[in-house]
Structure formats: structure tokens, C-alpha cells
Image (cartoon, rainbow, N blue to C red):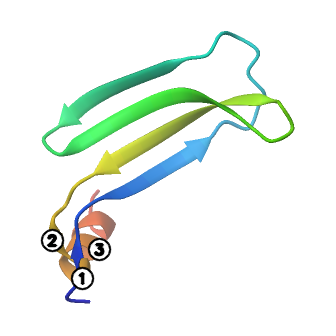
Amino acid sequence: MTCVVTMWHFGADALFEYSGEKYHRRWEIAEKILLTIYTKEWKDGKKRVRWDLQEYPNKAVKEALEEKLNVC
């Protein structure tokens, strides 16, 4: 638990298929936090919208996990 978390991703795919144009947007929503929303093409050729939160905690695993789990 003393290793340092330099970056991690949290994301999810939409449940429904998306048929519009390809889409990719990224916002820096806070210091060291990026939010990306984009279309993702699956192996079966279907597209879905996906969101991805990229964070750079640069903290020990234990500290980073405690901080993440205690956010209200």
C-alpha cells in the first residue's frame, strides 16, 4: 500500500447504442482531473457513448483510496 498512484481512470459506457457522428470532448474540470466524453466503437461495429474521468492523485495507494472512498 506504499506504492504511489500517479494516474487512474474511472469510466462507463452507455447502455444504448449511439448512431450519430463520432464525438470526442475533453474538459479539465479541476486541478489534475480530466473528463472525457466520446463515442467508442465496439468489436461488433456498434457505437456507444463513453465517459472517462482521469485523475492524477500522486499519493500512496492507501491514502488515495481512502480519499476516493470518503468523497460525499
Residue 57 sits above or below residue 27 on the image: below
Amino acid type shown at disc 2: Lys
View extreme (bottom): residue: 1
Which picture quadrant has residue 57? bottom left
Which picture quadrant has residue 17? top right
Amino acid type shown at disc 1: Lys
Mark nearer the N terminus (3 vs 2): 2
Return the residue nearer the eye: 15 or 61: 61
Q: Measure the C-alpha gap from mark 3 to mark 1.
A: 5 Å
Label 1 residue SS: helix
Q: Measure the C-alpha gap from mark 2 to mark 1.
A: 8 Å
Circles 3 and 1: CB atoms closer than 8 Å? yes
Q: Residues within 10 Å of mark 1 (few under 14, many from 20)?
A: some
Left or right: residue 19 versus residue 64 is right
Q: Residue at coordinates 29% horizontally, 26% vertically from top-left? A: 27
Q: Residue at coordinates 38% horizontally, 44% vertically from top-left? A: 53
Residue 23 sits above or below residue 59 on the image: above
x then y, percent, for residue 36: 41, 32
Left or right: residue 7 versus residue 10 is left
Q: Residue at coordinates 35% horizontally, 35% vertically from top-left? A: 35
In the picture, which quadrant includes the N terminus?
A: bottom left
Q: Residue at coordinates 57% horizontally, 46% vertically from top-left? A: 12
Say which residue label 3 marks.
65
Q: Given this view, does label 2 or label 1 mark the residue nearer the observer? A: 2
Return the residue nearer the eye: 16 or 21: 21
Left or right: residue 22 versus residue 64 is right
Say which residue label 2 marks.
59
x then y, percent, for residue 24: 48, 21
